[in-house]
Amino acid sequence: MYNLTKLIIEKPANMVFEAFADPAHIKNFWFTSSARWEQGTTVTLRYDEYDAQTDIEILEVETDKKIVFRWGGAGEAGNIVTISLNEMDSSRTIIEVHEEGFREDDDELMNILLDNKGGWVYMLTCLKGYLEFGINKLRAAIVH
């Protein structure tokens, strides 16, 4: 079972890629990152506003095109997230976030998928605000 979320970002693919890969950028729209996102590394992501932290394993990187990582568990456990960048032209990129690994037999599957989709839509909205308009205050706007 998987979830797919897409959004157009009015920036070239290399800028969108660097927004994730570079710790100086990702903190402006999502998590604080302990290191650059490179294949084979484990990166600690921290969301200080919500006192949340997780480690991700970067499984694959294709510069300006794709980042694949595992989170939510160690080793073979956890979900796999693929962030794909499809450059439409020199100023627009379709970003796709594909997360797989949800258990179809989970009684809470629909709630989990809806929560997951909401999280990716929120993150992509924050990314769009940051890259297109220089807004970095969206990332901590949700109140629990």
Image (tube, grey):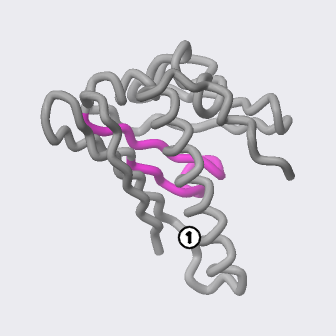
Toward which corner of the image does residue 14 lie, by quadrant? top left
Q: Residue furthest left?
A: 89
Toward which corner of the image does residue 104 lie, by quadrant? bottom right
Above or below, 45 against 111 in this view is above
Q: Is residue 103 left or right of residue 87?
A: right
Q: Nearer the viewer, residue 82 or 92?
A: 92
Q: Nearer the viewer, residue 143 or 35?
A: 143
- Mark 1: which secondary structure? loop
Residue at image x 39%, y 21%? 18
Q: Position of residue 114 (x, y in %)?
A: 61, 71
Few, some or many C-alpha atoms within 10 Å of disc 1 (few <14, some 14-19, many ≥20)?
Answer: some
Label 1 amino acid? Answer: Phe
Residue at image x 51%, y 21%? 134
Q: Nearer the viewer, residue 127 or 86?
A: 127
Residue at image x 72%, y 30%? 46
Toward which corner of the image does residue 109 lie, by quadrant? bottom right
Q: Position of residue 132 (x, y in %)?
A: 41, 28
| Residue on which the image places disc 1 | 102
Q: Residue furthest top?
A: 24
Q: Position of residue 51 (x, y in %)?
A: 85, 35
Q: Is residue 51 left or right of residue 62?
A: right
Above or below, 12 against 94 in this view is above
Residue 70 forms part of the magenta stretch: yes
Q: Position of residue 31 (x, y in %)?
A: 64, 31
* Region of the chain picked out in magenta, as a range: 65-82
Q: Residue furthest front?
A: 133
Q: Nearer the viewer, residue 91 or 47?
A: 91
Q: Is residue 33 left or right of residue 66?
A: right
Residue 87 forms part of the magenta stretch: no
Residue at image x 65%, y 35%? 138
